[in-house]
Amino acid sequence: MKLTFGDDVEAFRQEFLAWLADNRPTAEEMAADPAVSSAHVPEWASRWTRRLFDAGWLVPGWPPERGGRNAGPVEVLVYLEALSRAGVPRTTNPQGLGIVAPSILDYGTDAQIKDYALAVLHGEKAACLGMSEPGAGSDLASLSTRAVLDGDQFVINGQKVWTSGANYADFCFLFCRTDPDAPKHKGISVILVDMNTPGITVRPLAEIVKPEHPDLNEVFFSDVVVPRENLVGKMNDGWAMANGSLAHERGMVWLNFVMHMEQDVASLLAQAPAALARMEAPERAVVADGLVESIIDATAARCLGYRGFAKLVRGGSAPEQALMKAFCSEAQRRITLRSAEMSADHTVDIGVTPASDPTWIERYFTSYGGTISAGSSEIQRNIIAEKVLGLPR
Amino acid sequence: MDLELSEEESELRDNVRAVLAGVCPPAVVRAVYEGKGDAAPVWARMVELYWPALAIAEDHGGLGLGFVEVALVAEELGRAVVPSPFLATVTQFAPVVRELDAANGLLDRVAAGEVTGTVALAERGSWELSAVTATAEESAEGWVLQGTKSAVLDGAEADEVLVVARGAEGLGVFVVPRPALAITPRTVVDPTSPLADVVLDGVVVPPDRVLAAPGTTGVAEALERAGQEATVALAAATVGACRVIFEQTVEYAKVREQYGRPIGSFQALKHRMADMYLAVERAQSLCYFAALTIAEDDPRRAEAASMAKAAAGECQRLVVQDGLQLHGGIGMTWEHDLHFLLKRAIAGDALYGNAVHHRSRLAQMLGLVA
C-alpha cells in the first residue's frame, strides 16, 4: 500500500495536464452553448471530442488502433480526475462514448464501426441506448419490442422508456426481441436504428426538476424499417452484449460519484462556518455531525474506489462495482440534504443554493437518478448478495 | 494511492493469520473467558516471531518495518479475538516512548519481548489530553503523582505503566512499574481486552523514570501522535472482529433453512448482509488509509485516524446488531463462539474514544464546532 502513485503515473498526469491546458474548451465557450441532454453535442463539444480522439486522449485505456494509448487503469483514473478537476466534460454523450461505441467496436462490422462507433468517437454523431421498456427495466430479459426479419430488412414495433438523450440522438443502440419462441434472454438482438427513420416517435418525459430540459424520453416504434446490415453481432445474441454494456457503464460510475461528492463536501464546508454561526448550539452540533458523516463518506468512497482499482491493476476482478454504485449514490443523496439542513428556511425556499449552483431541491431530486437508474440500489444489493457474497437466489 | 496489500503485506497477513489460528483457536479464547485459561503461550509465540519488534527501529533491536504492518497484525488479533499485550505494548506504550525518549532503553526491551507496557491516559472516560487532571509535583525524592486513571488497557497485567499527569509547566509522562500503583481490575464486557482503574495515591517517580518532565516541549504533540497509532490499531482490530462476524453470518445464512429454503435466499436478509458488507469495507478502507498516513507521516493523519475509528465504531454497531439478529437463537447461547467476537467489537469501539467521540473530534478539527 502507498499513498502516492509511481513516477510513471505522475509523468502521465503531467503530460495530460500540459495537453489539456493547450487544448481544452474555454469556460466561456461551454457556458455560451451548454449541452441540454445526454445526447446533445454542441459545436464546441464536437470539436473537443475530435481533438481528444486525434491526440489519443478520448479513451486512453484503449489500444492505439482504436484511438487510445494503452493506458492502464490507474492512468485512466488519473486522467479522469484531471478532467473533472479542470471542470471540462470528457463527453456530452456519455452513453455513446461509454457503452455504445465500445460495444460496436467489440461486436460490430467494419462498416458499423466506421459509420457509428467512429462517428461517435469523432464527435459527429450521438447515440442513445434503447434498453428499458415499461415492462422491462432491470429485468431486461422481459423486453417485448419486436424486430421481424422481412427479406433484407427488419420491421420494428414496440416501445422504449427512460431513453436518455433520445430527443437529440442520431441513432439508437436498440435491444429488441427477434425470436419470441426462444427462452426469454436467448431471443434478443441489437440493431442500430437511425432516429430519423419514419415510424419513430420520441416523447420527452418532463422531469420533476427540469421540465424545460427533458433528458428522459419514451420512444415509440411503429413499423420502423431498418436494413438487415444494422444488426450488431449475431442474431439473438444481444444478451451477451447487454451484460458487456452494463459492465462498461458500472465500471466508470464510481469516480464520477466520488468527484461530485468531494466537490459538494468542499462546497458545504466552505459555507458551513457562516451557516453554523447563525444556529443555536444544540442545532449546530447536530448539523455539524451530519457534515462529518458526509466527509467520512466521501473519504471512504475514494478509498473504496482505489481499493477496487488496485485489484484491477493487480489483474484481479473488482466485484465491488455494485457496492460502489449503491454506496456512492446513497451517500450523494445524503450530502444534498446537508445543504438544506444548513439553511434556515430550507423546506420552503426552492431558491436556496448553499452547496453549488443548482438549488438544493433540484440537487436532491436529481440525486435519485443515481439510486434508481442503471440498476436501483435494491438491485445492487441483490447483486452484492448473490454475486459477491454467494447467497442463494 | 494504492490501497491494496502488496505481496509482502499479503504474505505477512497470511502468516499472522496462520500462526494465530494455530496458537489461539476459539478454545483458548473460551478458556480465557471462563477464567480457566492462560494466554501466556500466545504472547510467547508472538515474541518468538518478533511481532513486538515489527515497527521498532533497527537501532533499538527492532525490525524497522512501518505502521502498516502493525495495523495488519492488529486486524488479525481482532479477527482471532487474541488475548495478548500486543495492542497496549506495541501500539500504545512503545509509540509514546519512541516519541519522547527513544534512547532510554525501553524500546529495546519491548523489541526483545522482555517488557510489556501500557498508557494510563484516560480519566473519567475521556481520552482527551485536555481532560487530564492528574497532577505531578516535584519533590526531593522525585515527582509525586496524584489522581485517578480509568480504563487502562492491560492495566493490571503490564510490566510498565506510562502515566500522563499535569505539572505546573504542562503535561508530563512518567514510567511507573505496575507494583507501585493501586490497581483495580474492572469487570469488562470483553475479558480479552482487560481494563483497570489506576489510583495514583502519592506514588513517587524517581528522576530516572521521568520520560518527559512537565514543561518539556512537544509532549502534547508526541502524545497526540502516539495516540493516533493506538486509535488506528484499535480501529483495525475492531474491523477484524467485525469482518469475521459478517463472514460467519453469511455462511450461516447459506445453510440455515426455514420454510424449506436457506434464510440467505430471502431478500430482506440479503439486503442486510449487503449493508454489513458495505460497513466492513468502508471501515477497512478508512483504516488502510489512516495506517498509510501514519506510515508515511502525512499531515492528514489526525483526521484519518478519527475517521477510521468512527467508521470502525459505526461498523461495529451495525454488524453486531445484524450479525446477532441473523444468527437467531443460537447466537444468544454461551456455547456458540459468536459472542466473543461481538464483545471484542464492542470493546474496540469503546476504547480510545468511541465513534461519537471521534465524530465530535472531527467536527472540532474541521472548525465546525468550538
Image (cartoon, coloured by chain):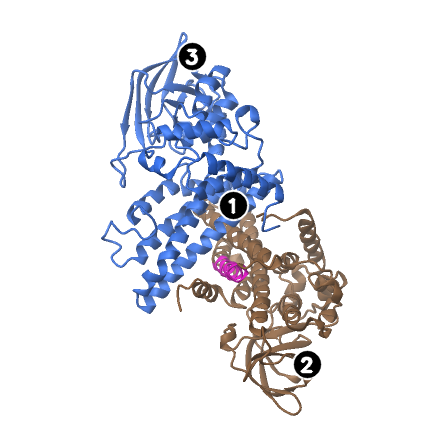
Dot 1, crowdedness within 10 Å: few (<14), some or many (≥20)? many
Q: Position of residue B95 (x, y in %)?
A: 64, 68
Q: Which residues are magenta?
A: B301-317
Chain letter for the part of the structure drawn in brown: B
Vertical comparison of A353 with A34: above or below: below
User: The disc numbered 2 marks a residue on which chain?
Assistant: B
Amino acid residing under circle 1: Gly
The residue identified by callout 3 is A228
User: The disc numbered 1 marks a residue on which chain?
Assistant: A
As rendered, which of B28 and A375 lies closer to the eye? A375
State the mark number for residue B209.
2
Chain letter for the part of the structure drawn in blue: A
Which type of secondary structure does the marked residue at label 3 adopt? helix
Horizontal side of residue A159 vs B260, given as left or right: left
Query: What main secondary structure does the magenta stretch of the protein show?
Result: helix
State the mark number for residue A76.
none
State the mark number for residue A305.
1
Which type of secondary structure does the marked residue at label 2 adopt? helix
* Identity of the residue drawn at 35% across and 25% down: A169
Amino acid residing under circle 2: Arg
Q: Do dots 1 and 2 share one subunit? A: no
Closer mark to the observer between disc 3 and disc 2: 2
Label 3 – label 2 distance at C-alpha: 89 Å
As rendered, which of A54 and A22 lies closer to the eye? A22
Asked whether the viewer can see residue A185, the reply is yes
As rendered, which of B117 and B130 lies closer to the eye? B130
User: The disc numbered 3 marks a residue on which chain?
Assistant: A
Which type of secondary structure does the marked residue at label 1 adopt? helix
Asked whether the viewer can see residue B260, the reply is no
